[in-house]
């Protein structure tokens, strides 16, 4: 994704089907930093032995860390800067092993111009495996 996509798509310019994506590797340093910021130090995320003993058989990234990519997309790319998060629903479908590259995408599915509300589908994938599905509602910035 190019940095030229960072900014604002105003309500008046939004269209159903518009989408933006971002990719990030969920490496050890990122997981440890998120654990400190969020105070979620569950050993399944931080300790190799705990991860190996889990149902996943390895350490995994925090689900909320992975889903934070949606916040980055909504606040920086679509609709972008000036958006106000109103709600989010998520389903965690599969674990994200450490060092996996996650690609998150948001797609406009509904626009309520009179209330400036925009609904977007949210999906995150690791390769061919969908790891998160959901939707978000934002108050979109307007020129008017």
Image (cartoon, rainbow, N blue to C red):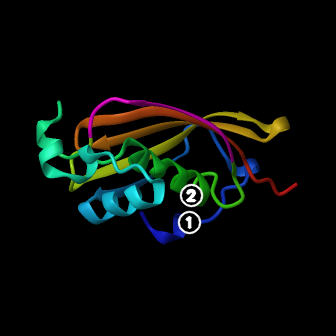
**Looking at the rendering, which quadrant does residue 23 occupy?**
bottom left
Closer to us: 66 or 15 = 66
Percent across and percent down for residue 58 are 14, 43
Q: How crowded is mark 1: few (under 14 residues within 10 Å), some or many (20 or more)?
A: some
Which contiguous range is marked in magenta? 85-95
Front in this rendered view, residue 108 or 27 = 27
Can residue 90 be spotted in the picture?
Answer: yes
Locate the N terminus by quadrant.
bottom left
Residue positioned most to the bottom: 3
Of the numbered discs in the image, which one, if any, rests on residue 77?
2
Asked whether the residues under the numbered discs 1 and 2 touch, taking CB atoms below 8 Å apart as contact, a structural biologist would say yes
Q: Is the magenta stretch mostly helix, strand or loop?
A: strand
Instruction: Say which residue appears at 73% left-offset and 48% top-offset.
Output: 140
**Location of residue 122 in the rendering, given as x and y in whole percent from the top left corner:** 48, 38
Q: What element carries label 2?
A: loop
Q: In this view, does 34 lie above or below 118?
A: below
């Amino acid at each position: 994704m190019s940095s030229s996509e960072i900014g604002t798509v105003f309500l008046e310019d939004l269209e159903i089907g518009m989408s933006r994506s971002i990719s990030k590797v969920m490496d050890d340093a990122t997981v440890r930093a998120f654990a400190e910021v969020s105070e979620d130090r569950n050993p399944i995320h931080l300790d190799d032995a705990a991860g190996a003993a889990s149902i996943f058989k390895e350490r995994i990234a925090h689900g909320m860390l992975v889903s934070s990519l949606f916040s980055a997309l909504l606040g920086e790319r679509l609709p972008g800067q000036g958006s106000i998060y109103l709600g989010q629903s998520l389903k965690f479908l599969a674990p994200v092993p450490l060092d996996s590259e996650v690609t998150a995408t948001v797609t406009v599915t509904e626009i309520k111009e009179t209330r400036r509300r925009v609904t977007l589908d949210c999906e995150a994938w690791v390769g061919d495996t969908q790891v998160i599905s959901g939707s978000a509602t934002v108050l979109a910035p307007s020129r008017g």
